[in-house]
Amino acid sequence: MIIWLLTSEFPPNYGGGISTYSYETACMLSEQGHKVTVITQDFNVKRLHHEEGKLYDSVRFNPSTYYTFSFLGYEANLSYAFAKAVEELIGIKEKPDIIESQEYMGIAYYLLQYKWLQYPIFKDLKILITLHAPSFLYLDYNKVPHFQLPYFWIGEMERFCIRAADMLISPSAYLVKALQNRMETADLEINVVKNPYKISGSIPTDGFTKNELVFFGKLTPQKGCLELIEYFKRLWAGGFSHNLTMIGGGAHMYHPEGKDMIEFIREKYKNEIAAGKIKLPGSLPPHKVMDLLRSAHVVLVPSTVDNLPYAVLETMGQGKIILASIQGGQSEIIEDEKDGFLFDHSDPSSFSSKLQHIISLTDEEIKVIGNKANCKIRSDYSYEKIYFQKKQLLDKLLEKNTARTSFPLTRNFTYKEHTPVTVSEKDPLLSVVIPFYNMGEFVEETLMSIHASTYKNTEIIIVDDGSNKTESAILHKLKDSYNFKIISKENGGLASARNEGVKYAKGQLLAFLDPDDTIEPEYYQKAISVLKQHENIYFVGCWAKYFGGASGFWPAFNPEPPYLLAHNMINSSALVYKKEAFLIAGLNDPAMIYGMEDYESVISMISHGYHGAVLPEPLWNYRVRKNSMARNFTKKKQVYLYRLIAEKHSGFFSMFSTDLVNLLNANGPGFNYDNPTLFYNLPGDYLINGKLKNMIVSVVKSNPILRKIAIKIRRVL
């Protein structure tokens, strides 16, 4: 079996749970005879670097070398780069039977988008998502403002990965249950398969240091480090004499205070640190960490939420005594008072009673428990046992027909019941409606782009919305050359012109295109393929490429609430529709006198259950002009139009009111941002262009030292 493993973290560049899982899984599958290729990011390679290894191959790619680096945020660009790296490798290597990816950071988001949008190279791929640490769950526990962009959008990418996967695996049942409160999972089958871990050597025989109590984990709220200190403060107040050593470096922001967690702990608990009760050794090399763990009497893992932490597997594998919370998959590893100990954060007294009990154990009792811990990890998490479970699922996935007639949506909801609309013909007629008002200078270029389309069964309808005689004459001069119909009417604005054109459309499919814009030849062909394949998709858009008075790109996204209700997220003036759905729910509202009629139309269609999707590539060319409507679009006009939309669709808005309020509170008014993958409201945003900002964020996120410096700078600003 050919298996490609996608991971954001892999040794030697990264440590941590995902990195460890990816390494252990690659080794496990390779030892069983599978051809494994690990694909990961590396800013130190030029483009795409391939290495053949004894056990598995590795491919490292540089995310900054893809053109999307100039306009997508760090995580979104990383996901795009993963998809393109896979595309390049399929042209070089033997095509994989299965691709496995983490859900964290949404790194498989664009890979799965391409798959379900019928892109030939991707549509037959079988993609397994293994759950590790979904940020939309963990950020909340880490007290991160997770409605702030791009954090919110990263969570949306992760949700899509989970809902779009061909198969799902979770290392713990705990995580499956935790997800139920954060997203819809009732219709998903999530298989529980533990993480593999291979123990090297025997249990260390050099014993432990009596009463050496060690916290092992990242210094983040989710790991329970703050609760742990408070538990110890109560113990010390009662006469407890033993100290707490906290292994874990810095560069983990404590968002409520805007500072590094280790800095926050040093400030808040300076008296305890000065008295020697709390020891903070800071960032340590791996061998120093292992030295501290080997000497520990008790290793403390007090997570407030967790999946199946490798810290527990590694520590139990060393025969150490662990006291862990039940708030995580560690409760599925440890059998309380047999091979470790468990306490419950909901009963704080359980921590002190369990710790006091452990300290009272004899050396022989500790040795017995440590041996049981070691034996459990060797047995239950061995390559042989985990592989047997995973292989059954891999075989099942190979046999599974993964084709779907419904496109994966991140949220299932019903606001208004809708009448399904299907495309019955093999090559349905596409009616392209062009609203025209004194655009004779540009319209021929628009017509040429439609005639160059690879989809040939089209009709063109131009609605002359009261143009002057000179401009109208240009249309009549071009009519025979480009074979289009002219509908003349008194000037009534863009909304009425579009609606008028639809009255004359004969096709089952409909597209709008402004008379100064153009399309790429394959746009309509790709859009229609999606409309024909997915019964729940009623309109399709794409990314925009600017030309004329500006250059650059605008990435669009599948239009779904709640973000859709804060800001338009799709190229709403150049969409391709199932016409009947547009007639039912998408007709442009003439009350939108200053614009945004197409955005309101999208919201109306979604509220009626007529969902849309976006082709993630620039297939629509948007001309930027000095005297265009967009250039004269003031904030006062936007505020007025947003109010009209919210009032018209108040019931729909109310369904998502909590999320919408949180989005607006975290990011400001929707007209202040237009790309959910980027940070907003950061100091100096107006001084830094997208590419430079992305470069800074990418470098900082990939370097622990720079992350620490950035946290301090942000606090000062």
Image (cartoon, rainbow, N blue to C red):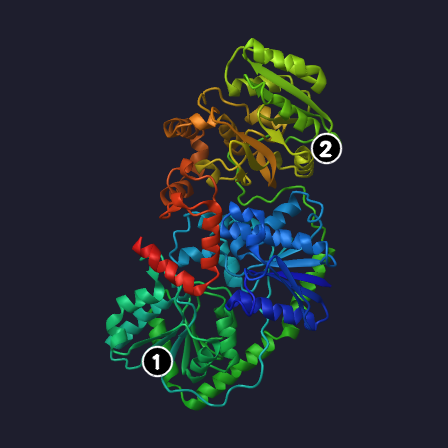
Residue 360 drawn above or below residue 529? below
* Disc sitting over residue 685 in the figure: none
The N terminus is located in which quarter? bottom right
Q: Which residue is mark 2?
A: 454
In the image shown, does 38 or 394 lie closer to the viewer? Answer: 38
Kindly give the residue lying farthest to the top in the view shown: 469
Between marks 2 and 1 in the image, the one whose residue lies nearer the viewer: 2
* Image position, residue 283 (x, y; %): 41, 72
Tell me the amino acid under the disc marked 1.
Gln
SS for callout 2: loop
Left-right relation of 657 to 25: left
Q: Is residue 131 visible?
A: yes
User: Counting residues from the N terminus, which is met first, the one under dot 2 or under dot 1?
Assistant: 1
Q: Is residue 26 above or below residue 199?
A: above
Residue 712 spot, x, y in % from top left: 34, 59
Give coordinates of residue 608: x percent, y percent: 54, 31
Give the residue number, with chain letter if any, for mark 1: 356
Q: Of 530 and 627, which appears nearest the observer? A: 627
Residue 190 in the image, given as x and y percentages of width and height: 59, 57
Give the CA distance from mark 2 to mark 1.
Answer: 75 Å
Q: Secondary structure at mark 1?
A: helix
The amino acid sitting under disc 2 is Thr
Residue pictured at 52% horizontal, 72% vertical: 333
- Label 2 CA crowd tier, 10 Å (few <14, some 14–19, many 20+): some
Which residue occupies 45% across, 20% down? 591
Instruction: Tell me: 647 left or right of 480.
Output: left
Question: Mark 2–mark 1 contact, CB under 8 Å?
Answer: no
